[in-house]
Amino acid sequence: MEKILEVNHLNKHYPVKKGLILQKEIGQVRAVNEVSFDLFRGETLGIIGESGCGKSTLIRMLIGLEKPTSGQIRFLGQPIENGMSASLRKQMQMVFQDPYSSLDPRMSVQRILEEPLRIHCKMSKQQKEQVILPLLGQVGLPREALKKYPHEFSGGQRQRIGIARALVLEPTLLLCDEPVSALDVSIQAQILNLFRDLQRQHELTLLFVSHDMSVIRYISDRVMVMYLGQIMEIATKKELFERPLHPYTQALMRAVPVPDPERRDQCAVLEGEIPSPIHAPKGCPFSTRCPYASEICRQQRPQMHRTGEGHLTACHRYSGEVEG
Amino acid sequence: MRCKYGLKTEQTNRTQPEEKQAASAPILSVEGLKTYYYSNGTAAPAVDGVSFELHAGEIVGIVGESGCGKSTVVRTLMGLLDPISSRREAGTARLGDIDLFSLRPKELCRVRGKRIAMIFQNPLSALDPVYTVGNQIMEMLLLHEKMTRQQARERAIELLREVNIPSPELRVDQYPHELSGGMQQRVMIAIALACNPEILIADEPTTALDVTVQAQILDLLRQLRDRLGIAVILITHNMGVVAALCDRMLVMYGGVVVEEGSCKEVFSHPAHPYTKGLLAAIPSVAQDKERLYTIPGQVPVLRLPVRMCRFSSRCGCSMPRCEQEEPPLTERAEGHWCRCWQESGKEVPADGENS
């Protein structure tokens, strides 16, 4: 399979400063810490994690909204950590979380959808319409929507506009940062199905960030679990949900309330809270809450261990396995 | 299975779903509550005839999507409506022997916080940033109870311990911004519990929290119910949260209750097409779904008077009658009520075939 995206030892550290005038650096927030993964053509990689785990920072670095502190990103074979050319730029688009703030309220839907074409392609008015109109149908909006403004639409419809805008340039890779978390359940189902249909029609590769385990299970082929800026576990969906190995993944699975009152007792509680990223634990980031934590976990950051076919786990408990 | 068939009117004395509750009188009973919002001279029926009862030690969930009126119900009960844009049109709410809506503002203040307390979705905006959390808990105690500041402070520390905040002696002097989201929500709960209320209203208490913290807060609410016997009204859009915590649930759509029953009953035998659709639309953590069922369309904008089933425009099994007459709540099984003309209701496919 062709690698669309290769990420190697990617880091993003923000300095923590103190003082008004002489801003002394007193520490670092490691928002993304030594993250490495590959993304293959046509697949959906789900990224799951709680707030502050670095999933949004990671996505913002990939699309170029943040500059990495160190590490390499190769997109379609070319390094992009220092910016990308316009032709490469076209190939990667993003759908944002909040459909209210990500659309310009003063632009009509037609202008919103035409904007990427205006920037990247020289097209006549008719040509632009030929691109936009079928897309509008695909995302389930009527033709009349073109003349309207974002405030005339509901949240779900706005997200459809946002998705159409991302697809106008026929990108290879679509980055989705929590695209359904602001939507109601029935609308969420519509948008998730839409992503699936569009992925088939446009042969898209998706990187899908969410904090909702059930959404990730529905949409992804492979899943990556992040905690405090690091990858804890990465595996195919089937492996991860049927055989979660990392204690954090296991805790996360048990914390999700299942819509079935008969299975109430299975909901177990993980003690403690995510440590502040400024004072992140020295060893394994999860060691402060992990029921299996031992001395080595507090001292040494675990490597990724290969624990199955395409299954990598960053945990000392699996250090007997081959390093991946 | 339908045991009996009866119309639920405002006068009907309703049987309770569980036997242990049949003996006790409800601590809160709401009848025919209507609240309308007004803008540009038109009325929007946000809540249009909601009745329910709450018993001691019971956790009742109100579920629905945004705009279904679930928050407006409890805001009306607490007297928190904006008097300019909204008005309570009809209905009564009895808390024990007092009528909540006939109270004068001063009298209401003695009930609110003391007998009914509320926690909100976003703890950081509900807490005052310029006071320490201790101060904010003490405010409740000094207002409602005869206590000295010293006693109130000790009680505040005790309350923080009760909601499982580590080292409460230190936390009591901290400001809200120094605490994490989960801790802030715990402080909110501590404030609500300060005067040992009979009823705790929780309006989307875990929506802003991470799943692992959400599990902790749900666990805390369950403990409080078991330990203090407090009755809880939980408002949420998350079916999983309802299943994890509630004894009974009300499903709201378009300002009315479309289904009501014990959680076990509603989840295992959902009767209303909307409830069925909602349950089928949730992706599952436990199993792979080929395709999600989707409820077509969106929540309609209602105009008064409503003379049809509010769900008919999105319903897969709507009949001509649904367009002409609003169905009443009818009892489908003991304590299980549903607002639908379909007597048993057609099955919704598990994997969406409609889209």
Image (spheres, rainbow, N blue to C red):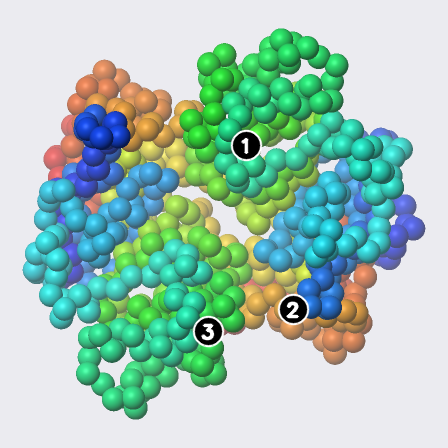
Q: Do callouts 3 and 1 point to residues on the same chain?
A: no
Number of residues whose C-alpha sits closer than 10 Å to that of mark 3, classed few (under 14), some (14–19) or many (20 or more):
some
User: Which chain is indicated by disc 1?
Assistant: B
Judged left or right of residue B144, residue A60 is left
Query: Quick check: marks 1 and 2 in contact, CB under 8 Å?
Result: no
Q: Quadrant of residue A17?
A: top left
Q: Position of residue B189 (x, y in %)?
A: 59, 28
Relative to B65, B112 lies left or right? right
Residue A144, position as x, y percentages in the image: 48, 83
Residue B135 higher or lower than A185, as above or below: above
* Mark-to-mark CA distance, 2 and 3: 19 Å
Looking at the rendered structure, the secondary structure element under dot 2 is loop
Q: Which residue is mark 1?
A: B128
Please state which amino acid type lies under the numbered disc 1. Answer: Asp
Disc number for residue B301: 2
Q: Nearer the viewer, residue B22 or A227?
A: A227
Q: Position of residue B341 (x, y in %)?
A: 76, 67
Looking at the image, do the residues carrying marks 2 and 3 touch, with CB atoms under 8 Å apart? no
User: Which residue is tagged 3?
Assistant: A149
Disc 2 chain ID: B
Q: Position of residue B32 (x, y in %)?
A: 83, 52
Q: Residue at x 33, y 51 (%)?
A: A209
Could you tell whether A303 is left or right of B92 in the image? Answer: left
Q: Helix, strand or loop at disc 1?
A: loop
Of the residues under marks 1 and 2, which one precedes in the sequence?
1
Residue B6 visible here: no
Up the image or down, B29 lies above or below B36; here it is above
Given the image, on which type of amino acid does mark 3 rest? Tyr
